[in-house]
Structures are given as structure tokens and as C-alpha cells.
């Protein structure tokens, strides 16, 4: 059976940490920024860990399983 290919769209959106966590960037930071507070916009800069419910699906697309 051939090797599983990595889903390239998924690979561009998610990052794997050294400990095996999958990190994602936050949404809502691309437009309509005038009405959002500076504090709120600052929090969008940081990555966050992927939800447990999505882990299996994303891990498969990244070729981890």
C-alpha cells in the first residue's frame, strides 16, 4: 500500500509542536478591525491548541495516523 499523502491545505493551516500538540491560528482577525478593541486584536495574534473533537480529523490529514 502506498504512503499516505499530507493534505497540503491542512499542512499550511496547522503546526505540530515538539510535544505532539496541534496548534491553530485564531479566526476573526482579517477585516472589520476598527470596531474591535486593541486587546481583542492582540489576542488574535497568538496560536491556540486544537480542540479535542477536531484532533483525529486534522491528525489524519497531516499524516500522523
Image (cartoon, rainbow, N blue to C red):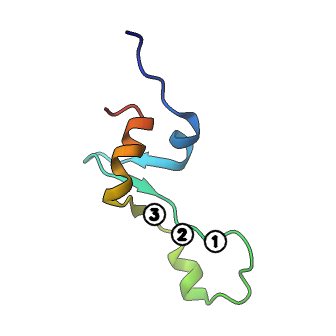
Q: Which residue is mark 2?
A: 45
Q: Is residue 32 above or below residue 10?
A: below
Question: Can you tell which quarter of the image residue 44 is in?
Answer: bottom right
Q: As rendered, which of 57 and 14 lies closer to the eye?
A: 57
The residues tagged by marks 3 and 1 sit, at their Cα atoms, a distance apart of: 12 Å
Residue 14, given in percent of the width and then of the height, sits at 48, 48
Q: Secondary structure at mark 1?
A: loop
> Mark 2 or mark 1, which has the lower sequence index?
1
- Report which residue position mark 1 lands on: 29
CB atoms at circles 2 and 1 under 8 Å apart?
yes
Residue 22 percent location from the top left of the image: 37, 51
Residue furthest to the left in view is: 19
Q: Counting other residues with Cα less than 10 Å from the Cα at mark 1, is it few (<14), some (14-19), or many (20 or more)?
A: some
Alpha-carbon distance for marks 2 and 1?
8 Å
Q: Earlier in the sequence, mark 3 or mark 1?
A: 1
Residue at horizontal 42 percent and vertical 11 percent from the top:
2
Which class describes the residues within 10 Å of circle 2: few (<14), some (14-19), or many (20+)?
A: few
Residue at 71% x, 90% y: name it.
35
> Residue drawn 31% across and 51% down?
21
Q: Residue 38, located in which quarter of the rendered image?
A: bottom right
Quadrant assignment for the C terminus? top left
Find disc 3 in the rendering and name its residue: 47
Q: Nearer the viewer, residue 53 or 8?
A: 53
Amino acid at each position: 500500500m502506498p504512503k499516505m499523502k499530507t493534505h497540503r491545505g491542512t499542512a499550511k493551516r496547522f503546526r505540530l509542536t515538539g510535544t505532539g500538540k496541534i496548534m491553530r491560528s485564531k479566526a476573526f482577525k482579517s477585516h472589520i478591525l476598527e470596531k474591535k478593541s486593541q486587546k481583542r486584536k492582540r489576542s488574535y495574534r497568538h496560536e491556540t491548541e486544537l480542540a479535542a473533537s477536531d484532533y483525529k480529523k486534522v491528525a489524519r490529514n497531516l499524516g500522523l495516523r
